[in-house]
Image (tube, rainbow, N blue to C red):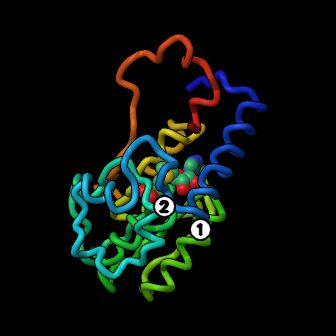
Amino acid sequence: MESNLTEKDITLIRESIKSKYSQVAAAGAASCFRYPTGLEGLKQQGYPLDLLRDFPAALIDSFCGVGNPFSLGPIHPGDAVLDIGCGAGLDSLLAAKMAGPEGRVAGVDVTQAMIDKAKANLSVLGLTNVTFQLAEAESLPFPDNEFDAVISNGVFNLTLDKEKALLEAHRVLKPGGRLMLADMVLVAELPPDKAGKIENWYQ
Ligand SMILES: C[S@@+](CC[C@H](N)C(=O)[O-])C[C@H]1O[C@@H](n2cnc3c(N)ncnc32)[C@H](O)[C@@H]1O
């Protein structure tokens, strides 16, 4: 798919995304978004709060997903799961509980501060079937046919090459694997004062 983005646009978007999500990692999601985040977001999106009971406050407070990928289908015991744009790790760690000790979860994100926070949250919970690493949705560091399920929450709208990101998700899924993706889409033309403004990509 053709992109109208210049190299300057791409650099600006990349740096702005990392800067915004480094702030969220440091201070939590409250007041950073126009939709409910943290515990309120989890309640409104119908997350199974009983499974989140031992999750630390720092993990709950950093949740900034826009929906609930788990509402699209179950994670089965023993599943291998990839969480693209894992943030501070809430969906990854929930998926790990659902997949159980026979399953495994990998979380990737482009923001180092988020990966550091996800690793800190993992060590509090003491789960041994989860890894977090720095990586881009458009270039996943995994072999073909690796995962039973790919989940993602509020990330694809930020990716610079959406077609490439979807192809990557498809590549790493096993045949018959499930893509369970929550995201935001435009349902109408942007007003003229907003259309074409590069800042709208990451605000
Ligand atoms: C709205 S937050 C959602 C975080 C997490 N999924 C959650 O539900 O709390 C978006 C996340 O996507 C990450 N991100 C943005 N662009 C990305 C890309 N191209 N590849 C991987 N992660 C990306 C950001 O660093 C940020 O942590």
Which is nearer the eye, 26 or 141? 26
The image quadrant that residue 8 belongs to is top right
Picture disc at residue 177: none
Q: Quadrant of residue 158?
A: top right
Residue picked out by circle 2 = 86
- Give the residue drawn at x 48%, y 72%: 58
Q: Give the residue type that dot 2 points to.
A: Cys
Residue at image x 42%, y 78%? 56
Q: Are marks 2 and 1 in contact (CB under 8 Å)?
A: yes
Marker count (numbered): 2
Q: Residue furthest front?
A: 31
> Dot 2: within a 10 Å radius of its alpha carbon, few (fewer than 14), some, or many (20 or more) residues?
many
Q: Quadrant of the N terminus?
A: top right
Where is residue 74 drawn, in percent x and y?
21, 63
Q: Is residue 43 left or right of residue 168?
A: left
Front residue of 79 and 113: 113
| Front-most of residues 1 and 195 | 195
Q: Secondary structure at mark 1?
A: helix
Q: Is residue 98 left or right of residue 32?
A: left
Q: Amino acid at mark 1?
A: Ile
Q: Is mark 1 within 8 Å of ligand 1?
A: no
Return the mark for residue 115: 1
Residue at (31%, 54%) from the top-left corner? Answer: 69
Q: Position of residue 18 (x, y in %)?
A: 66, 51
Q: Residue furthest right?
A: 8
8 is higher (above) or lower (below) than 64: above
Residue 112 x, y percent position in the rendering = 66, 63
In the image, residue 4 lies at what x, y percent? Answer: 65, 21
> Which is nearer the N-term, disc 2 or disc 1?
2
Above or below: residue 32 compared with residue 83:
above
Label 2 CB-ligand 1 distance < 8 A: yes
